[in-house]
């Protein structure tokens, strides 16, 4: 109680008739009730309201209230700032009316003036009732017309998505793709900027409004004025990389093919050394070779396959080799493919402009002096030349059985390898087109193809990629003209400089890295979309595997012919590299016949761009992690425990958040947005800080379909065998452990946010 209350004496039981005057004096002295802070008042609020309503019905209370107001006014005429309103039931403490009712003369002392009070109360009640009725009717009218004009997406609208997808995809016709393909091959390809400008004009002519040309000045390693050569020192025979002798006519092959049979960013010069057959260049191969000979400054004869090229070259460089001849064993190719007399081009660039590693090649950027990316002299050669070098007959197929190429038990050859190339700065161009979304315009689904300005035998491969993406643009814009638009923004990209190490995609992504980290939802690759046979090769990150499989089943139902396939998460070549390994973006890629590749890619694109909840699967990531820990090398309690916690959390996330969000009746827009923000960043936790050359930083991707373990763990074990040290395996295990734990913490934090939000609403 306060000081004001202590100055007011309590009413005596012998003089209850003075209760009213003392209460009124208390009101005059304080100007407000001292009982408002009383704990008993707060604890019995509902009971107080009922008591006061009952007391208001007692005879004479109306007169008490009005009379008290008059006396209050007269007694405080010199204090104009005091509250002059009569005592209100809501502010009257329990007990005050009880004391008044104890006075036997309570009714006789304060008689009611019924006519005047009832009249006032009746008009006041009538006025309040009419006002409330008008507001209620007005609210109903506003709600009705607002719902009619601005209806939110209803469940009945969602099944129409499948119909919309079908209408768009049926506009992608094989004859359209073939016509676009022929038109692309007619482009003069003297410069990357020229062909990029042609693609830009074509996309705009199809109806894509926002198309831009983005240029970067980058360091390219181009062939010299004459072809590289391989010379046998014993006989003096000189060969081009294709296997043709240097002194013969080369009319059968285009001169550009000879020039562009090289390894970009290789060391330059001439090396004369012994040729050593290292087969596939695995750790086991190197251990075997080093046990019988000194490999320092020698030239390795290396087959492509089994492991990434850059990884195998790093092993050979560490072992001390001076040069490498690359070839493809015919036994590793499909029977229908004949490349025995063809050399090829490879790039030793891991990605992006070599002169600006890790940052964009914009004007003013510091340029590092990185003319060679390896100390090795590297040269691709044909299988025909490889057979000549190891003195084998050209026909290695016996009784329908292919015999792999291998160096004879007794044999030694000295060769001279001459490599000349020129490094220079050139402008490469990316074509970027936007189809803006209406609901989530700040969320991007990127579809990437590439173009090629090199006029060589493999130069036509890019045209199928660009033809498919152009046909898809044409089908989409036809629907846009009828009023449709995707919910999320679709970004179409044709990358330049892909053959030199995905330079165009790297530079653009490094340039817009901060925006892409926040906005990119998925990347769909059209790097090598046409296989030329009926085998479907779908590759997808774990969170997109289910969607890729469902899209394939959808096309099977429509086409009745279902190609056998198995969606997997394996390393792939192409411009998706930066998005996988630096942004942690979910990626998918289909390789099939041209029309079917376009339909499958279009189906997946439309679903990701339009479904309210992103069609990603969190549980598949957890399952992929557990598969990656199979084997004795990962049988570590801490790893298995954190992987188990990740699966438990992912299952909870899938059941508690994903399932309700996919039910239109339970869907809340704010929760859907929060859920999608979590889904699009699921794979970012699996980016390790550093990976061996050629291996993905994103550990969710395996080396190939034959292995299920994490590639960094397999490589660490191989490194341990080669160097007799377990330091590398311990570091790799720590990287994997922290990645899995980070993902589990991320899932758990997402669940906690949803629980907090739900509790706040309740």
Image (cartoon, rainbow, N blue to C red):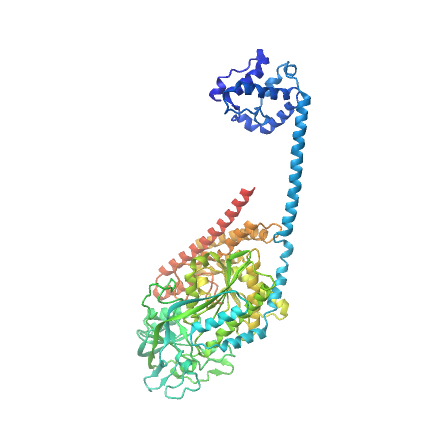
Q: Nearer the viewer, residue 409 or 174?
A: 174
Q: Residue furthest right?
A: 115
Give the quadrant of residue 610. Answer: bottom right
In the image, residue 147 above or below residue 340: above
Q: Is residue 637 visible in the rendered structure shown here?
A: no
Left or right of 720, for residue 60: right
Position in image of residue 687 (x %, y %): 43, 59
Q: Is residue 298 visible in the rendered structure shown here?
A: yes
Q: Nearer the viewer, residue 759 or 128?
A: 128
**Quadrant location, the C terminus:** top right
In the image, residue 503 above or below residue 261: above
Q: Tally the marks.
A: 0
Left or right of 303, for residue 136: right
Q: Residue at x 44, y 86 (%)?
A: 252
Position in image of residue 693 (x %, y %): 39, 66
Position in image of residue 245 (x %, y %): 38, 86
Position in image of residue 121 (x %, y %): 66, 27
Q: Residue furthest top?
A: 14
In the image, residue 666 above or below residue 712: above
Left or right of 190, for residue 168: right
């Amino acid at each position: 109680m306060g000081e004001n209350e202590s100055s007011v004496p309590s009413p005596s039981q012998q003089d209850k008739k003075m209760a009213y005057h003392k209460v009124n004096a208390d009101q005059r002295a304080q100007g407000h009730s001292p009982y408002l802070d009383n704990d008993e008042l707060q604890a019995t609020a509902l009971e107080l309201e009922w008591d006061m309503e009952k007391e208001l019905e007692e005879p004479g209370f109306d007169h008490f209230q009005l009379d008290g107001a008059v006396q209050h006014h007269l007694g405080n005429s010199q204090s104009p700032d005091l509250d002059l309103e009569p005592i209100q039931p809501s502010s009257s403490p329990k007990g005050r009316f009880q004391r008044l009712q104890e006075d036997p003369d309570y009714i006789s002392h304060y008689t009611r003036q019924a006519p005047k009070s009832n009249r006032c109360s009746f008009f006041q009640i009538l006025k309040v009732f009419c006002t409330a009725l008008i507001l209620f009717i007005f609210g109903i009218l506003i709600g009705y017309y607002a719902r009619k004009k601005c209806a939110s997406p209803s469940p009945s609208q969602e099944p129409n998505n499948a119909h919309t997808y079908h209408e768009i995809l049926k506009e992608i016709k094989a004859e359209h793709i073939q016509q676009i393909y022929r038109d692309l091959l007619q482009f003069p390809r003297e410069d990357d900027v020229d062909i990029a400008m042609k693609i830009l004009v074509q996309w705009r002519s199809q109806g894509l409004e926002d198309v831009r040309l983005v240029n970067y000045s980058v360091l390219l390693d181009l062939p010299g004025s004459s072809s590289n050569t391989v010379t046998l020192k014993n006989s003096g025979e000189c060969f081009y990389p294709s296997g043709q002798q240097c002194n013969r006519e080369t009319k059968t092959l285009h001169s550009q093919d000879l020039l562009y049979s090289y390894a970009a960013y290789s060391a330059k010069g001439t090396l004369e050394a012994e040729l050593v057959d290292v087969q596939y260049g695995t750790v086991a191969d190197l251990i075997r070779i080093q046990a019988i000979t000194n490999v320092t400054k020698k030239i390795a004869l290396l087959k492509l396959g089994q492991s990434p090229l850059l990884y195998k070259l790093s092993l050979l460089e560490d072992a001390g080799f001076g040069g490498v001849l690359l070839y493809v064993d015919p036994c590793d190719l499909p029977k229908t493919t004949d490349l025995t007399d063809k050399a090829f081009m490879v790039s030793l660039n891991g990605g992006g402009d070599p002169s600006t590693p890790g940052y964009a090649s914009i004007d003013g950027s510091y340029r590092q002096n990185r003319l060679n990316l390896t100390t090795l002299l590297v040269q691709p050669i044909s299988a025909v030349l490889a057979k000549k070098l190891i003195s084998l007959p050209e026909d290695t197929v016996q009784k329908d059985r292919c015999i792999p190429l291998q160096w004879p038990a007794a044999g030694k050859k000295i060769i001279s390898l001459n490599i000349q190339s020129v490094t220079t700065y050139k402008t490469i161009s990316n074509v970027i087109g936007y189809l803006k979304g209406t609901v989530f315009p700040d969320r991007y689904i990127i579809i990437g193809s590439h173009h090629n300005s090199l006029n060589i035998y493999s130069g036509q491969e890019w045209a199928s990629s660009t033809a498919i993406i152009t046909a898809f643009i044409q089908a989409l814009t036809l629907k846009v003209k009828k009023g449709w638009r995707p919910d999320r923004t679709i970004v179409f990209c044709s990358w330049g400089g892909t053959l030199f190490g995905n330079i165009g995609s790297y530079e653009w992504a490094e340039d817009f890295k901060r925006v892409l980290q926040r906005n990119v939802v998925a990347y769909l690759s059209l790097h090598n979309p046409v296989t030329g046979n009926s085998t479907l090769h779908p590759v997808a990150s774990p969170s997109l595997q289910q969607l890729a499989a469902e899209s394939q089943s959808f096309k099977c139902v429509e086409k009745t012919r279902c190609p056998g396939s198995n969606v997997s998460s394996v390393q792939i070549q192409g411009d998706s590299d930066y998005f996988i390994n630096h942004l942690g973006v979910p990626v998918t890629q289909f390789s099939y016949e041209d029309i079917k590749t376009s339909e499958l890619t279009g189906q997946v694109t439309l679903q990701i761009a339009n479904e309210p909840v992103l069609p990603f699967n969190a549980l598949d990531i957890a399952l992929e992690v557990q598969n990656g820990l199979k084997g004795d090398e990962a049988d570590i309690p801490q790893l298995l425990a954190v992987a188990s916690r990740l699966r438990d959390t992912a299952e909870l996330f899938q059941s508690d958040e994903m399932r309700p969000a996919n039910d239109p009746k339970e869907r809340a827009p704010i929760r859907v947005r929060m859920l999608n923000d979590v889904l699009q960043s699921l794979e970012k936790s699996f980016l390790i800080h550093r990976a061996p050359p050629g291996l993905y930083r994103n550990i969710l991707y395996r080396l190939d379909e034959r292995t299920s373990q994490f590639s960094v763990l397999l490589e660490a074990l191989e490194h341990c065998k080669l160097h007799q040290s377990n330091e590398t395996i311990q570091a790799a295990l720590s990287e994997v452990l922290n990645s899995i734990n980070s993902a589990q913490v991320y899932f758990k934090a997402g669940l906690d946010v949803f629980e907090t939000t739900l509790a706040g609403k309740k």
